[in-house]
Image (cartoon, rainbow, N blue to C red):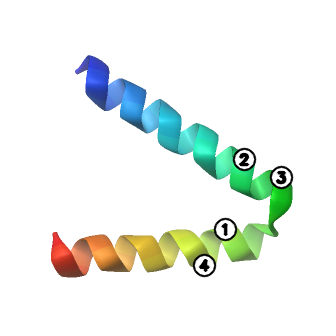
Amino acid sequence: MYLRRSSTRFLECAIHLCVTHMTLQEVADLLEKEAAQLRRFG
């Protein structure tokens, strides 16, 4: 559970970092592409 929570926290921080340098739409598009890859190969 610790690693799961840590991983989630890291992901949230990474998303917040992206938002400081990209538009919200760019971040959303990036996350959608990543999610599609996970669904396709997962």
| Quadrant of residue 40 within the rendered picture | bottom left
Q: What element carries label 1?
A: helix
- Residue at 83% across, 59% down: 21
Tell me, for residue 37, which label it has, or none.
Answer: none
The residue singled out by tag 2 in the image is 17
Mark-to-mark CA distance, 3 and 1: 10 Å
- Please give the name of the residue rendered at 43% of the width and 72% of the height, measured from the top-left corner: 34
Report the amino acid beneath label 2: Leu
Q: Earlier in the sequence, mark 2 or mark 1?
A: 2
How far is disc 4 from disc 1 in space, using C-alphas? Answer: 5 Å
Say which of marks 2 and 1 sits in front.
Answer: 2
Q: How far apart are marks 2 and 4 (CA)?
A: 15 Å
Q: Categorize mark 1 by other alpha carbons within 10 Å: few (<14), some (14-19), many (20+).
A: some
Residue depicted at 52% across the width and 68% down the height: 31
- Per the rendering, the mark at residue 20 is 3
Q: How far apart are marks 3 and 4 (CA)?
A: 15 Å
User: Which quadrant of the figure contains the C terminus?
Assistant: bottom left
Q: Say above or below: 36 vs 31.
A: below
Q: Which amino acid does label 3 sit on?
A: Thr
Query: Is residue 18 depicted above or below 7 in this figure?
Result: below
Question: Counting other residues with Cα less than 10 Å from the Cα at mark 3, is it few (<14), some (14-19), or many (20 or more)?
Answer: few
Residue furthest to the top in view is: 2
Q: If you read the primary sequence from the N terminus, does the residue marked by circle 3 or circle 4 appear first?
A: 3
